[in-house]
Amino acid sequence: MKIAIMGAGFSGLTCALTLEKHGYSADIFEKRGMVGDRMVYAEGISSIFHTPIKDYIQFLSENYDLHLKPTSNISRTHIYSKNESATLDGNLGFINMRGKHPDSYEKQLAEKIKSPIHFNAEVNYEEISKEYTHVILATGDPMDVQEIQPFEISYKASFRGSTVSGEFKRNEIYTWFNNDFAPKGMSYLLPHSETEASLIVVYPQYPENQKKDKEELWEQCLESAQKSLQQKLSITNDYSLKDFMVGKAAYPRIGNTFFTGNCLGCISPFIGFGQFTALLTGIYAAEDICGLESYEKQTKSIYQKYHDSLTLRRLIEHSSNEQLDRVVKSLHNELLGKALTSPKLQILKVLAKVAHPIPRRT
C-alpha cells in the first residue's frame, strides 16, 4: 500500500502515528511551512461534551498509546449570561495550546512522527489519488471536500480574539452567553499560564450579525470579561477570522479516500471545538487501512454527536438574553450541576433528544 495524508493537523498526524505503530508509513503533505503554522491560542476539551469518556488524556493513552501533555486540567468553569452567573466544579477536561506555541498539540504529535512531512506542498487531490492507493483528506478545509462530495455547511462563524495578560487560575475557565456582544454565539477565556490567557468571541455569520460592528462587539466582550474577572486585561496579541465553516461531509469514506478532522465534520456546532474528535478520526482511518476496524462504523457515533450538538446550537440561537439568564440561573441547582458533570448520565445527549425528539439522519 502507498498512503498519502493531505494535511499535518490533528487528524493527519494521529493517522500517521497509528499507521506507524502497525508497521506502515505515509507521505504527509502540508501546504504551510511548518506544523502549527498559525497564531498561538488556547483551546479546551471538556468531558461534558465527550461522555461517557471522563478523561480523554487517559483514554488516548490507555487505548491508543497516544500520550499528550495538556497545559492544565479544568477544575472549575465560570458561566455568565447578561445578568446571571454560575459555576461548575469537577474534573471538567483540559486546556491545550495550539499553533506555533512550543507545547501545542500539533508540535507534540509532530515530534513523534517518523513518516516524512513535505512542507510547502501545493498538491491537489486529483494528482495524489492517481499516485497513492489510499488518501487521507485532513486539510481541515471543507472546500477541499466539496470538490469530491457534498459538504453540508451548518453555518459560517466569525472569531475575534486576543492574547491577554492578567492574573489567572490555570484550572479555571470562563464562558459568556450574551447576545449583546456574542449574538447567537459565545465568548470564552482560557488561561495559558498564571499571567496569560486567550479571550475569544465567536458567533455565526447570519445576515443580521453581518450588519454588526465586529470591533464594537469585541470591545463589549473585553469589558464584560474585565468586569467578571474584576481586573484590567492587557492585550498582547490580536487575531481575527471569518468564514470558518462548521458542517459535515455526506460520507466518511469514498473508495480508498478517508475524510478526517474538519473534512469529516468534527467541529461541534454548539461550542465550536473539535480537537478530540479530530484526533479520533485520524486513528479510526488508520485502523481501517490496517484492517482492524471499519471507518464507517466507528464514525457513526461522531455523526450522531454532531447532530446532537447542532440541535443544542439551534436552541441557543433562538434564546433571548432573558432565556439565557434562566438557563444559567438553573445551574445553581446542585442536582443539575452534578448531572452535567457526570460521565454516567449523558445530559447533553438527553437535552438534544428533548429538544429534537425525532432523530436527525446520520
Image (cartoon, helix red, strand yellow):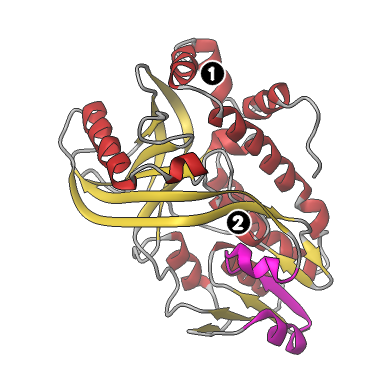
Disc 2 crowd rating (10 Å Cα; few below 14, some 14-19, many 20+) is: many
Q: Is 231 situated above or below 114?
A: above
Q: Is 183 situated above or below 297?
A: above
Can residue 131 be seen at all in this image of the molecule? yes
Q: Nearer the viewer, residue 346 or 244?
A: 244
Q: Nearer the viewer, residue 105 or 182?
A: 182
The residue identified by callout 2 is: 278
Amino acid at pointer 2: Ala
Q: State the image coordinates of residue 301 (x, y, percent, origin top left).
A: 75, 44
Whether residue 109 sits left or right of residue 228 in the image: it is right
Instruction: Report the mark closest to the observer, 2 or 1.
Output: 2
Q: State the image coordinates of residue 332 (x, y, percent, origin top left).
A: 44, 12
Total labels drawn: 2
Whether residue 336 sits left or right of residue 265 in the image: it is left
Which residues fall within the magenta stretch?
A: 124-148
Q: State the image coordinates of residue 47 (x, y, percent, origin top left).
A: 55, 37
Q: Quadrant of residue 238?
A: bottom left
Which numbered marker is on residue 338? 1
Q: Is 53 situated above or below 163?
A: above
